[in-house]
Amino acid sequence: MAAALLLWLSLAGGLSAHALEPGFLDIRETAPDQFLLIWKVPQVSGTPMEITARLPDSCTQPRPPQVSFAQSAFITSWQTDCPGGLTGQPITIEGLDATRTDVLVRLEPLTGARQTLRMTPGAASAAFAVEPSLGQVVQTYLYLGIDHILVGIDHLLFVLALVLLVPGRWALLKTVTAFTLAHSITLSLATLGFLTLPGPPVEAVIALSITFLATELLRLRRGEQVLSARKPWLVAFTFGLLHGLGFAGALAETGLPPSDIPAALLMFNIGVELGQILFIAVVLAVIWLVRRILDRMPEGARIAALGQLTVIYAIGGVSAYWLLERVAGFFA
């Protein structure tokens, strides 16, 4: 287990702590069969990700696009005419299959309900329904929440550190519940506009929270009394407030319309929790299996101790790298 986790963490150190934020295509009908498109493309090393939004062949582009850069994404806007409208016709994100991100496509018609589609590398083409349902919003943001937690390596490292820190299932349940409650509070407040903090400092403190837990794990192994071991729920709740702001940043990137916020916020949060529970279940299952194997080996206890120490140092090293990288970004 230690070798596998160390390899994963080492690779993670060369990547962004988050998966790329989702791309976003906003389509607003300004007149019958006439649409304004705003296309937000994530940046990759200072350049736009190589993905292109392709509308049905019936659409035209009467004026050249306008390109700008804002909020770590390249934004293009243009007008187009689509005789017959856009419902029931495929929209494709070309090049998405070669990425590791999603794209949300939202349609705001002159009449009728707004719709949101979620494109993925494995399903880069979809069509708006003629008669949309609330179920579309529910499914879209539920899956987005699951995706965001499962590929948000920094959030997962924090949860992994909690699992290693807290002995006993009941204590772990209380600690994870405190973390869940805390990030649900700030996620909701930030999404509803009651709480606003700049993203870079929040991301830096999230990295600091992981480094702190790694340090606490090392101190605990030396037999010291540490706050995170005495009151892990308090530490989880405190840092969970900051992690919630990180989740809110990802949700805000989708450009939620006011009418979608209640359902989208609820389902995104549920998706995050489902992904978190799945991750914890996998980690506990791996730990149980490795312990069963090592218990049958003469040097099993020593190997287990060395493996855990290796994982702790890997968590601390990767998070310290992220911390330095994010703080350096303040001055870039």
Image: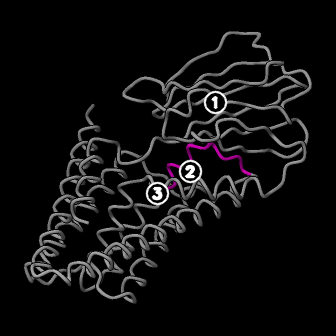
Q: Are marks 1 and 3 in contact (CB under 8 Å)?
A: no
- For numbered disc 2, what is the local secondary structure? helix
The residue beneath circle 2 is 251
| Residue appearing at x 51%, y 41% in the figure | 101
Q: Which residue position holds label 1?
A: 93
Which residue in the protein does label 3 denote?
A: 150
Label 2 amino acid?
A: Leu
CA separation in Å, label 1 and label 2: 20 Å
Q: Quadrant of residue 77?
A: top right
For the N terminus, the quadrant is bottom left
Is residue 249 highlighted in magenta?
yes
Q: CA gap, disc 2 to disc 3? A: 15 Å
Is there CB contact under 8 Å for labels 1 and 2? no
Give the residue type that dot 1 points to.
Ile
Asked whether 196 or 54 is in front, the reply is 54
Question: Which range of residues does the magenta coloring cover?
Answer: 247-258
Near-viewer residue (78 or 168): 168
Tell me what residue is drawn at x 84 percent, y 31 percent: 86
Q: Residue furthest left?
A: 222
Classify residue 295 as left or right of residue 109: left
